Amino acid sequence: MNRFLWPLVGFIVLLAFLAVGLTLNPKEVPSPLIGKPAPAFRIAQLQAENSTIAPEDMRGKVWLLNVWSSWCVSCREEHPVLVEFAQQNLVPIIGLNYKDKREAGLAWLAERGDPYLVSAYDLEGNVGIDWGVYGVPETFVIDKQGVVRYKHTGPVTPDALRNKLIPLIKELNRA
Amino acid sequence: MIPEIGHLALILALALALVQGVLPIIGAARGNAALMALARPAARGQFVFVALAFACLAQAFLGNDFSVLYVAQHSNSQLPAHFRFAAIWGGHEGSLLLWTFILTIWTVAVTQFSKQLPEEMLARVVGVMGLVSVGFLLFMLFTSNPFDRLLPAALDGRDLTPMLQDPGLILHPPMLYMGYVGTSVAFAFAIAALLGGKLDAAWARWSRPWTTVAWIFLTLGIMLGSWWAYYELGWGGWWFWDPVENASFMPWLVTTALVHSLAVTEKRGAFKNWTVLLAIVAFSLSLLGTFLVRSGVLTSVHAFAVDPARGVFILAFLGIVVGGSLVLFAWRGPQVGLGGGFDIISRESMLLVNNVLLMVAAASVFLGTLYPLFMDALGFGKLSVGPPYFDAVFAPIMALAVFLMGAGPFARWKQSSATELLKKLWGWLLASVALAVIVIFAFRHWTAPIVGGVTLGFWALLSSLAYLVMRVREQNASGVWAKLRGTTRSTYGMLLAHFGIGIFILGVTLVKGYETTSEVVMRPEDMTTVGGYTFRFINAQEVTGPNYRGVRVAVEVTQNGTRVTTLYPEKRIYNVQTMNMTESAIDTGLFRDLYVALGEARSLDEWVVRIQHKPMVDWIWVGCLIMAFGGMLAVSDRRYRVPSRRRQPEAGALAMAAAKTS
């Protein structure tokens, strides 16, 4: 073959890769926790200061852990979606109130509605570290055996609920 | 009203760009002088309209017109005026407008400084640049119009990302874009030569100054970006091998190779195809850089605009421009011929090997940058390639290239001998090793990479000096001053650029080898010692800026009991985007930087403080400045100002003289 064609061939291969690359989402970083048991914690609840909550309390149920905070801007976008979703009673949602002031967190729920069964109160962010949280909001799906099955980074959108979360929750509920 | 004028100006600019891109090229193919003559006025008219659009956007920013969506997204009434102006290119749409504006500036410059160009050549060069501009204007008008309205208007803007609120934003992007877009001139010359079928020494000489100027801007743009990241991000790092940094570094490597291969093509008529290919690749990588940053294919701290529709457009554009040029290359390349032959050891062979090394280095950066994308596209999952890969692959290749860089100028064109080279250079090589040993003893600690890096740095410095000494001795003039003046500016330019590389390498090696970092929790009156300096935490005070609140900590620095300086690192929260920013405080010195940044606060009075002692770090940027200055000297050489028509008859004699003197 004509050696002057090689640059063109190389470029066409590159173009194909770039085209495929466009269809992928680099933000979808897989969590190393997927398929592993949910990291354990037992910390105080946000509302009932003297009660605690732990992942093992949820054993036998499919549940969501949603990391939120009153200082988080994207959570404002996400919150109404969660409130509406919670009304469907498809799955219990546990909140993880992350590095927040207790009064601010309570005021947030009072003002915007509370989609959570309970919220765990993670003042120092230690639970967040164990769960590999690097941005708020994040949402984890945990199955009946207490294994993390999915992680959604960023605000939960109606789209994400319809296409990813709800089908997965229904499937896990049947298992 | 003004934004609509801007929008209209863009549409008119597109019409003129079409005229500029199509008619002169047809004219050149048919020998129609009237069509060719359209190139100049069309290019200038396009420049006027794009400049008008740019001015309209500037007016929208400075006048706080939040009914313009782009302004509402990237500015705020509290933002200081100079940042409101720089915010024009703080986002996607405005960056594109800046890109196009700079392209028209380059095009007008070509029409201005082209008196000795044949009409045909000029028509083709300006035409190709017009076609590139068509692509960018279409892109803007169809997917990324900076003048889109927001109705009802926002009360106030969402503000510029705090990370960008820095003098760095004012300088870095325009410089870098001048470099990126500057490669389009060399590209247009290459395409024009392929279209005309004439790749000769004259073509190479016309391309050379343009390529060098683009290279100067790329060098300065990358340098500014690195310096900005160093003081703004608060980590004290100066290069992260981040995809966006790599996107600017690859064109630099290829343009560097191009500058050298153009020299061979001009002086010896060799490497023609290689030179043309380099010119195409350099511009393609500039476009690819735009694609990578703007399409969101790769994530990075820099990628602030992510939109698949835009990605598809850029991909198609890339396919047409690069694919089209490569088709042209495959079609016309075989007819070009080879030019003068040369020996295994000669200036040509040295330059060829250096060129290949620079391309391999660029390819390794390319592979590292796109590897995650390739793996993901093939279904092997997500992974990231970090600095360990780049350091391990890049350093050895460049070490070899720098070694040859020192020896190359001593080799004669066409034929040289290894023993002769060795005879001239072994003393300087030994001196480099000796100096490296002295430096390492001064620091009392060493590893193999440090020894190698320091030796190489001194080698680049000393071999440049040695070459100057040799050239000056060869001069016929009497007296050192007359001899120094008799040496051409392009020779000085080359030496200075190579010298800058040496300074750069010394900076990189020594800061990597000997920097010390300490992260401590400090309260008032706490002290800690880093790199022989004592840092005392004096106090923390709340401060209020025009659009942020924050805390400023005073840290006093002493050395052996004498006060050196007081540093004031800050932590800021910007009002609009409620984003935390770390403002590091740096004491800059010729031989070291002291770098203090605040981490988390335990309370107002108790902070995690990150203190770094960074020896020689500023040499990195000084080295880049010296390189860029060398480029400027080379461009200002007399021979580029002598009209070529007058030179043509004596071209043979001149070429011989050039071969002898350089």
Image (spheres, coloured by chain):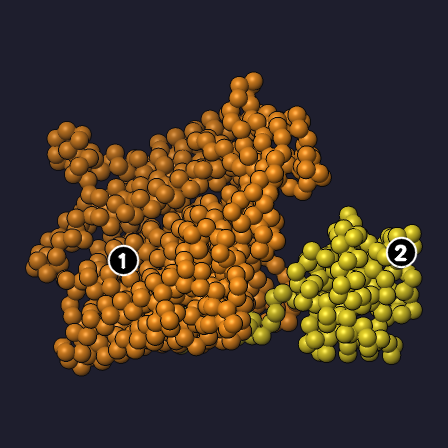
Chain colours: A yellow, B orange
Circle 2 Cα neighbour tier, 10 Å, few/some/many (<14 / 14–19 / ≥20): few
* Residue nearer the viewer, B518 or B441: B518
Element type where label 2 sits in the image: loop
* B255 vs B503: above or below: below
Instruction: Where is residue A31? Give x, y as percent.
Output: 72, 62
Q: Which residue is mark 1?
A: B210
Instruction: Where is residue B587? Give x, y as percent.
Output: 50, 33
Instruction: Where is residue B294? Give x, y as percent.
Output: 49, 66
**Left or right for B41, reference B18:** left
Q: Which residue corresponds to the image point at 35% horizontal and 31% vertical from the top-left?
A: B427
> At label 1, which amino acid type do we have?
Trp
Identify the image quadrant of the N terminus of chain B.
bottom left
Query: Tag 2, which chain?
Result: A
What is the number of callouts on the image? 2
* A175 vs B236: above or below: below
Q: Which residue corresponds to the image point at 76% horizontal and 63% vertical from the top-left?
A: A111
> Residue A48: which disc?
2
> At label 2, which amino acid type do we have?
Ala
